[in-house]
Image (spheres, helix red, strand yellow):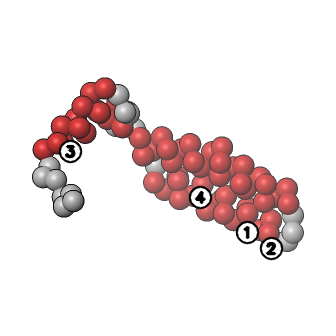
Amino acid sequence: MRILLLILWFVALTAIAVGVAFDIPKVVGSGVAFLFFVVFPVFSYHRWKNKKVSDYLLNKENLDKMKQYNDSKPSSKTF
């Protein structure tokens, strides 16, 4: 998956660079669209697979964990 991401990233950046170098706005736009609609979703899938999404959501349980963690730390306020 990592090699695929590198290849897709290289293709998108090459398209953008060629479009800028030869002043072809459609190639630049295609490179940016490819980056936005293909490379970023593939990268997001690669980074998030096998992870529990609920660990990253602010639900009641996680808010309680954060509050409990912050209450257990000694206060650093010296007012």
Q: In this view, does 18 lie above or below 66?
A: below
Q: Nearer the viewer, mark 3 or mark 1?
A: 3
Q: What element carries label 2?
A: helix
Q: How crowded is mark 1: few (under 14 residues within 10 Å), some or many (20 or more)?
A: some
> Which residue type carries mark 1?
Ala
Spatial CA distance of label 3 from label 4 is 40 Å
Direction front: furthest residue = 79
Q: Which residue lies furthest to the top in this view?
A: 60
Secondary structure beneath label 1: helix
| Residue wearing tag 3 | 70
Which amino acid does the dot numbered 4 rest on? Trp
**Nearer the N terminus, badge 3 or badge 1?**
1
Image position, residue 25 (x, y; %): 85, 60
Residue 63, numbered label: none
Residue pointed to by mark 4: 9
Q: Where is residue 5 in the image (x, y as percent from the top left)?
A: 53, 53
The picture places residue 19, in percent across and down from the top left corner, at 80, 65
Displayed quadrant of residue 77: bottom left
Distance CA(mark 4)–CA(mark 2): 18 Å
Q: Identify the mark nearer the N-term, 4 or 2.
A: 4
Numbered badge on residue 17? 1
Please state which of residues 41 and 76 is positioned toward the viewer in this rendering.
76
Which residue is drawn at the image coordinates 14% and 49% (left, top)?
73
Find disc 2 in the rendering and name its residue. Answer: 21
